[in-house]
Image: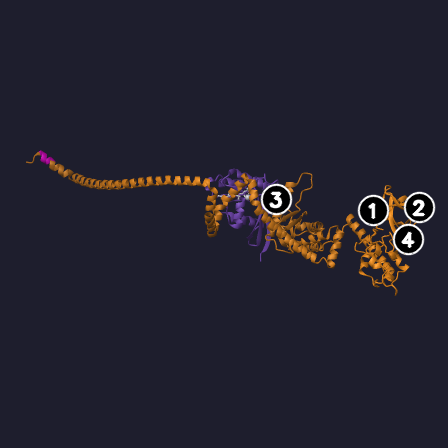
Amino acid sequence: MPSGESVLASVQSILLSQERQQIQELEQQLNLMRCQTQVTIEQLQGRTGELEAELDATRLALRKAEAQARDLETAVDLLQRKAQADSEGLIERITPVFSSLVSRQIRDSRDEMAEALGPVMSEAIRVQIRDSRQEMVEALSPIIGETVQRAVGEFFREMQQNVDAQLRVTFGPNGLMRGLKARLRGVSAAELALRDSLSFELREIFIIQQGSGLLMARYHLAGQETADSDLVSGMLTAVRDFVHDSFSQPDVEAADLNEVQYGDKRIFVQGGRAAFVAVVLTGIEPAGFRAALRQLVDELNVSYERPLRAYNGDPATLPVLTPLVEEFVANVLAEPAKPHGMSRRQGWFLIGSMAGLLLFTAVACFYLQFTIALYPIAFPSATPTITPSVTPSLTPTPTPTPTPTHTPTPTLTVTPTFTPTPTLTPTPTPTLTPSLTPTPTYTPSPTYTPSATLTQTYTPTPPAAAPFANVWVRREPSLDSEPFVAVEFDTPFILISVLGPWAEVEWLSDLPWLPGVQRGWVPFAWIQLRTDVLPMTATPTPTPET
Amino acid sequence: MKRSVQKKVCLLGDFAVGKTSLVRQFVEGQFDDRYLSTIGVKVSRKTVELDQVQLNMMIWDLVGGNEYLHTERSYLMGTAGALIVCDLTRENTLDAYARYTQQVRAVNADAVIFYLANKLDLTAERQITTGQLAQLCASLGGDFLLTSAKTGAGVNEAFTQLARQIEGE
Ligand SMILES: Nc1nc2c(ncn2[C@@H]2O[C@H](COP(=O)(O)OP(=O)(O)OP(=O)(O)O)[C@@H](O)[C@H]2O)c(=O)[nH]1
Ligand SMILES: [Mg+2]
């Protein structure tokens, strides 16, 4: 009989066999896991060892790097000190390296360089300008100066070409006309040529609706057409509005934009109630341009105010404006040359011209008379002896008549021409030519010493002056000067000059101890003038040698 | 061939709401993150092909805020339509709707007005709801559109819609 314990055991085994099995399985799994854990731990221990070894190596490397860094620091320090000591030398050595590097970089990747440097450069420039304005000005002025110089040079070259072109026609009839035109306008011919060289060109005309800025019509006349002219008209309108709003004051007539300049072009703006007109041009506008423009705008606004105001962007609704514009263009290009009134300067010019003309006529008449008078001398009769008929031509009259003897040109010598020697050629010699120059100055040349043959024929006709009574003649215009001769009452005098109360005279002396033509000073009050021509100069002239 | 017609339209709204950006997106198809306040006025042009006509829109982009322009009245002269813009990320920019509507109406009672709410792409910063917009625009008697000058959303539609209404199509 089984004992109770064994029964209990068998019952237990029946009841718990499943659980026991599970426990066994769990135990097995536990063992397996323990084994795995053991393996993992071992693996990890191995890895840790490796890591520790790596760490050691890294530490070593770090120590090495630290040492290197210290070395580098020392080297840099050294370099810095060296650089400070020899910064210029270093710059010199480094510059070529940097320059080649930079130029290669610029060549290979221009855009990247520009992109990279742009912001830095602009910032640097800004800072530089702020901090050291003067230095920047000094550094930049040569470059900017050169640029400006070049631009100005180009402008002047172009202008010079234009002026040259203008001057090339100066000597033709057009040139003469221009000269006259310039005088009538009160400017110099050069100014006119300069102005003409800044050639005026009417380029475009815009008719723009007031307010909306819509472009209603556009006329292209010369040059390149403005791209986006509708935008230009819009912007012009906006600018006009801006000017109007910004500069207008209450109770004062509204400010208006008259002119805009961009590059070498100018836009003339003329406002109207419904439409305004903008004219693009280059050069200097002719006189009366603004008036013509105003007239165009007035006519446009008067004739077509309603359709222009009602314009809603549909070109079909616009009236035909071309004839008015054509008329304006014709007016402007005709260039009104009418002088408005005569200025003082212009008046003087006209008077001068007329005086010149009269003088010219007088000289021409005299020349004719002179030629006739000289004819017998130039073509004498068979014997070249001196006859009294020669004398008048040698008369040193104080009148501004250009007799050969009185010509003030230093080259003129009377003697060779009129010496009545057989060498006298019957044709007028070239030395006569300058004698045609009329001059009111009577300055007897020192060569006026009459030769022996002439003395007998010296009869000054008509006498210019004569003393009232016997008068003392002195060498100098002063009472301190001793009189050297007394001249008899009514002796024919030639008045040479006047200095204060003194008159310088010339006369023909027949005194045996003082023969020939003499010169000296007498009190002016003692002489009586026989002609109303007074000498122009009052400078004492040297007394000729006797 | 279609007839060609020119019309002036204005962009109005407070500063930095994106008026210039909207024009740029519409005219050039481009967007820039930088803010360069418009000096006075900038006029641009874009041709819009409609069923009947070819409409040359002269777009006047005015600087935002009255402090810069003495009176905006003269700039609005002859305008056929206006786009009034607010910035969805700044609630106070909505006030401009009523103010500018009044100014446009004073110059041209028949002008077509469209209300734009810009910067739609900045969803996180948005401060104005569509309900708010609908209510305000209904009171002002105009339509509104949400736009983003950055992504281009609604931009073409805004200008084309304005063009259509101006031409009565
Ligand atoms: N994210 C985002 N930014 C925008 C948008 N539109 C404009 N911006 C930015 O907002 C800023 C102002 O834009 P603008 O177009 O210059 O503004 P505006 O209204 O013309 O400004 P004012 O000319 O000063 O009146 C710029 O930085 C733009 O890049 C948009 O739709 N989305
Ligand atoms: Mg802007």
Pointer 2 chain: A
Q: Mark 1 = which residue?
A: A540
x, y (%) of residue B111? 59, 46
- Farthest residue, direction left: A1
Q: Residue furthest bottom?
A: A382
* Chain that bears disc 1: A
Please report whichever mark, 1 or 4, sits nearer to the chain's N-terminal start: 4
Q: Is residue A53 above or below residue A381?
A: above
Q: Is mark 3 within 8 Å of ligand 1?
A: no
Location of mark 3 (residue): B75
Q: Looking at the image, do the residues carrying marks 2 and 1 touch, with CB atoms under 8 Å apart?
A: no
Mark 4 or 3: the one toward you: 4
Residue A470 bears which disc, if any? 2
Secondary structure at badge 2 equals loop
4 and 3 marks on the same chain = no
Give me the C-alpha separation between circle 1 and circle 3.
Answer: 84 Å
Q: Which colour represents chain B?
A: purple
* Residue A5 falls inside the magenta stretch: yes
